[in-house]
Amino acid sequence: MRAIAVSTFRADPALVEVPKPDPDTGEVRVKIEYASLNPHDWQRADGAGADALPLLVGVDYAGRVDMIGSGDNRFRVGDHVFGRAGGPAAGPGTYCDYVCVPQDSAIALVPRGLHPRAAAALPSAGTAAAQILEAVALRGHETLLVVGAAGGVGSFLTQLAAARDVRVIAAVRGDERSRMGSLGAAATLDVTAGPVAEAIRAACPDGVDALADLASATPAAFAAHAAAVRPGGIALSTLGVAAGAPLTGGVRGIDFRLDPNPALLEVLAAGAAEGLLRVLIDIELPLEKAPQALDRNRTGGARGKTVIVLRENGHC
């Protein structure tokens, strides 16, 4: 089958041919129609050690079940499904024609009314957004600063928080006021237009109740954003830099860890199918263009999700 993989040490991801997998007991094999790109994909590829090769890229997918492993199973051949392969870190790869996953993993049926390309964009970013909102513990009529709000996670987080009557301050690169406002952001700050701290103070003179930083890669940059959080508030990092950040004023730092599960996938998909949650797709590319898409994502400034198209499907 076709796959995007890192085949040799320090090599870039490339299109290769690998054997088609067969499902083990309790697994399903999915014929992938769409996969979606996450920063985790190129980060994992860049860090691949020689003992992990070949490493197939990708974790998010949507497609049809085409084979069932032995034993009991909650799925049937022909089911339209989507999910996240593997746990919070590693996975078998989804930029490929087929993937085998346990039937009790983060996999769910695609509901009627939701196109599989949108379903493929939901698992990692949608789950992260929902769990980040729970982690910062905002219940409405409070303020959340989202740094890196224009990407997949930020777009979902802005919508979910606004639906809970949380006032979202979206920090993005470039002029995204119209788009972020349409997602529910109360204010949008262009971090390239001037000092970010001054823009945050102007938007929230009394500070914010919580920070969700999806972009800062160093403790110092994270701490600079966390300075806007009121005493006793929460500052969350998705890049693992909160633990080493010099936070003041009793602000509690959290390094977020994703916990994918099928129940949450079902809730997110139902919301998307009903039009309550918009799935913003930035670009669709064929499988052979996936390496270029990974390079593009490395530069940052994503606007929604990148979807890798393996097979067109009109199911909805």
Image (spheres, rainbow, N blue to C red):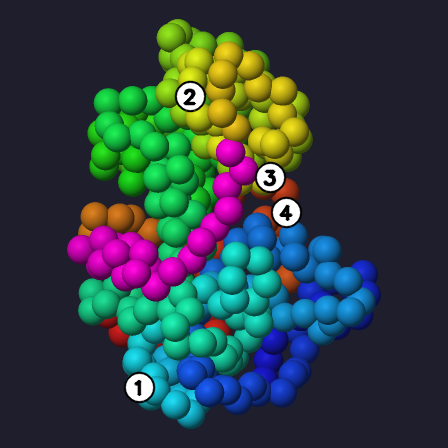
Question: Is 263 a magenta residue?
Answer: yes
Is residue 162 left or right of 15 when viewed as pictured?
left
Is disc 3 in contact with disc 1, using a CB cutoff of under 8 Å? no
Q: Which residue is mark 4?
A: 298
Q: Nearer the viewer, residue 276 or 237?
A: 237
Magenta stretch in the rendered image? 254-274
For this orientation, the residue located farthest to the left is 274
Q: Amino acid at mark 4?
A: Arg
Instruction: State the residue position of label 1.
Output: 76
List the residue tagged with mark 2.
233
Picture quadrant where residue 55 is located: bottom right
Alpha carbon separation for disc pair 2 and 4: 31 Å
Indicate the position of residue 251 as horizontal and vertical percent values: 49, 20
Q: Mark 3 vs mark 2: which is more N-terminal?
A: 2
Check whether the beta carbons of the residues at disc 4 and disc 1 lie within 8 A of each other: no
Return the disc, 4 or 1, that comes first in the chain's sequence. Answer: 1
How crowded pointer 3 is (Cα within 10 Å; few <14, some 14-19, many 20+) is rated as some
Q: Residue at x 38, y 69 (%)?
A: 107
Count neighbours of disc 1 (C-alpha within 10 A) and say few if under 14, some if 14 to 19, many if 20 or more: few
Q: For mark 1, give the secondary structure.
A: loop
- The residue indicated by pointer 3 is 240
Instruction: Name the kind of residue labelled 1 in the image.
Output: Arg
Cα separation, mark 3 vs mark 4, equals 17 Å
Let me know if residue 290 appears in the view: no
**Mark 3 or mark 4, which has the lower sequence index?**
3
Classify the position of the N terminus by image quarter: bottom right
Find residue 246 and report its image quarter: top right
Q: Earlier in the sequence, mark 2 or mark 1?
A: 1
Residue 179 magenta-drawn?
A: no
